[in-house]
Amino acid sequence: MNEIAVAVESLRNGGVVAFPTETVYGLGADARNEDAVRSVFSIKGRPADHPLIVHLGGADRAEKWAASISGTAKSLMVHFWPGPLTLVLPARDDVPRVVTGGQDSVALRVPNHPVALELLQAFNGGLVAPSANRFGAVSPTEAKHVRSSLGDQVDLVLDGGPCHYGLESTIVSLLDDCPRVLRPGALPLSALRVVLGRDGIEFSERPATLPRVPGALLKHYAPATPLEIIAGNMLAFHSAALMVRSLRVAVLRYHGKSLDRHIPARQFFLPDEPEGYAHGLYAILRELDNLGFDHLLVEAPPQEEVWWAVNDRLARAARGSQLTV
Ligand code: TXA
Ligand code: MG
């Protein structure tokens, strides 16, 4: 039996299978099997009222989950599915409320990854798939991340290599008149505007006003090492101030042409454009955790719209880490 067939059999028996998507790895279970869904919540340590995304093998399956699909929803599906866009729609009555966290809406997505699509099409049903990490932690972008943190709690980890985007899907709610972004993500706002028009999408910079979604919690996507976001020209000062207190400090910079000799701390680099940065961010945060630094200073990326999802995740990862100088 090939791996997909083994995975499908496990899912049919209520098992939990981690699988790759183009955004991050997901923790998959049969969305119609309430016990299987509950085991996903318990493996993640996720509160039961935080809803899960139902992943589908094609847009034609959406009507089995959504009570109604508006013209706007259809055109977003046509343009962006399969792809890193999750749509929140009114849920059909038969959608298990354990999936939706008790809400009457359901989040749907068709991932654009050959392994995910093969699995979903062979399974021929919906799979819940939260990011395959413990609640609040950094999402996995490689199979080895899943194996090291949750490997002994899942039945199988399908390996599809490193995820293309490395950052979660963009979530858009279609419950109100105007589509609204609930979570910035891999699909840029500019792409949504091409389909919806300049003013056709609402985006709030203030996550505290959003409905309850784990990604909207203030501290989330966080590494174990305390993390602060610091303007580039202040990195030398802040790292020196921490190091005189014998703290082991790492600095994560984004325009990585050369080492800055004024910065006394060890320097790590991510690309200076948002796609490359997002692709490497979670993996480097994990690596830095493993290296045992006491403190991580992240050079603030530009406050430009193309950096929206990166800035969102960094801000949440930093929340709760006190400025110590
Ligand atoms: O890229 C992704 O979306 C990844 C991959 C694996 O597909 N999945 C992911 O799932 O990030 P998770 O569970 O970590 O985040 C799902 C988000 C949560 O913030 C959740 O609250 C929100 O989707 N969500 C799910 N159902 C919802 C609903 N009915 N209304 C509002 N938000 C919802
Ligand atoms: Mg998550």
Image: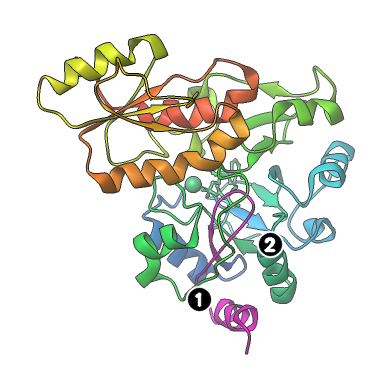
Q: Nearer the viewer, mark 1 or mark 2?
A: 1
Up/down of 43 relative to 1, above or below: above
Where is residue 225 shown, x and y percent of the image?
27, 37
Are the residues tagged 1 and 2 within 8 Å (C-beta)? Answer: no
Query: Type of residue at label 2?
Result: Asp
Is residue 9 inside the magenta stretch? yes
Q: Residue at x 31, y 18 (%)?
A: 261
Q: Nearer the viewer, residue 177 or 128?
A: 128
The numbered mark, 1 or 2, whose residue comes first in the sequence reads 1
Instruction: Please state if 316 lies on the left or on the right of 3 as rendered.
Output: left
Pointer 2 local density, CA inside 10 Å: few below 14, some 14–19, many at least 20:
few
Q: Which residues are magenta?
A: 1-28
Is residue 302 inside the magenta stretch? no
Q: Is mark 1 within 8 Å of ligand 1?
A: no
Q: Residue at x 18, y 20 (%)?
A: 242
For the question of whether residue 183 can be seen, the reply is: no
* Residue on which disc 2 sits: 94
Up/down of 35 relative to 23, above or below: below
Q: Residue at x 73, y 57 (%)?
A: 65
Where is residue 56 shown, x and y percent of the image?
72, 60
- Please give the label number shown on residue 15: 1
Instruction: Please state if 325 lies on the left or on the right of 272 as rendered.
Output: left
